[in-house]
Image (spheres, helix red, strand yellow):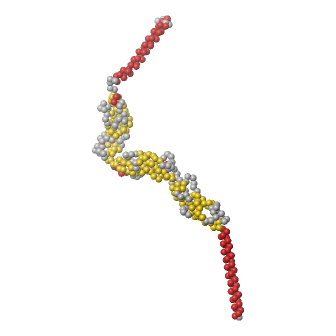
Amino acid sequence: MNKKTFNNVWFIRLISLLFSIFLYIFVSSENAVPLRSIKNQEFASVNITETISNVPVYLGKTDGETFVSGVPETVDVRLTGPKSIINQVSSETLRVETEDLTDMPTGSKSIRYLVMDLPDEIDYQVTPSRTIVQISRRESVKKTIEYEVDPQAIEEGYQVSQVNLKPYEVTLTGTDKIIKEIDRVFINITSQDKQSKNFTGTYAIKIVDKNGNLLDVNANIMDIKAEVVVEPVVGDVSLNIVPQGEHHENFTYTYEFVDQNTVSIQGASDIQSLDVIVDFFSLTSSQTVIGRVNLPEGVELVGNSEIKVHVSLHALEADTQTDSEDQTASQESDSSEESDQDHQATDSQTTEQTNE
């Protein structure tokens, strides 16, 4: 083939056409393969193998008095069979049970697992296929639920006055040995923020022995609703009279509480006493006045807020004048006694001279 042939326009067009036809045939044949596969599946059953994980395990038949410890919560199930059937199976539709445990003696036993209600066309394998469990006598008991309140959950100056639990008791099921070890059932009431108002929360129960160790016991309900009533701390404190406006140049003062010398307060737990401010500036006679309790920030009085104080005034001028009069009378009395003694002495001398 000479150089003129390749320079011929029609020859180049012919080669291009043949190459295009070749590409079209090649691509069409590749696309036809999956189409044939799909059409074949419409007329044939295809077997597949699929593993379904985390399938829940249920207890099989028992005599009602058997308690089994050590059964795994979930297992894996490997299924083999027609794809059309396996595609309809999921962990929600599968049910795995232990073998029949009726009349099985107590102690450590190796038990196997069964997949229930599978079509005959499906083969299965459970992993693990067997488990060593502890079989014991079953007991149930009802316990009242107690509660503990985390001190960090309550604002300072406030306290928990009441807790309502719903429900307030729980049914526990376990081996006869473990049931006898139960000391208490309680919830621990906590809060991320310090509370100064009523609040509600849901808390998981704890089942412990006398040493505080958690026990392997089943409960008919695990989460308890707690309604917590929070109130300010109320306490009695003593009162101190703090006078203001006294006129010590004119009077002396004595004062005392009339009705009470203590008050109830809320909002603080570390206060031992409070001052009662009493203004005496305008007083000119003894009387009963109302004092003002000096309250720190955040503290409130509970009950009577009027503190009565009786004030007794004694005028200093009257007392001085009385003392002066008493002193003058005393001096006059002393002079009179001396005069009487002088007269007696004179009379005695006159009598002696007369006798002579």
Who's the residue at 38% across and 46% down the image?
Answer: 219
Task: Give the x, y percent position of residue 66.
Answer: 31, 45
Q: How many marks?
A: 0
Furthest-bottom residue in this view: 356
In which quarter of the view is residue 288 placed?
bottom right
Task: Give the x, y percent position of residue 102.
Answer: 29, 43
Looking at the picture, does residue 226 appear above or below residue 8?
A: below
Report the front residue among 187 and 22: 187
Q: Is residue 62 left or right of residue 316?
A: left
Report the front residue among 136 and 165: 165
Answer whether residue 24 is visible to the viewer in this image: yes
Report the front residue among 153 and 82: 153
Looking at the picture, does residue 145 appear above or below residue 86?
A: below
Task: Give the x, y percent position of residue 319.
Answer: 65, 70
Task: Give the x, y percent position of residue 115.
Answer: 32, 36
Q: Is residue 195 left or right of residue 131?
A: right
Answer whether residue 273 is visible to the viewer in this image: no
Looking at the picture, does residue 11 appear above or below residue 345?
A: above
Who's the residue at 68% across and 81% down the image?
Answer: 336
In which quarter of the view is residue 282 placed?
bottom right
Quadrant (top left, top right, bottom left, bottom right) of the C terminus: bottom right
Furthest-left residue in this view: 103
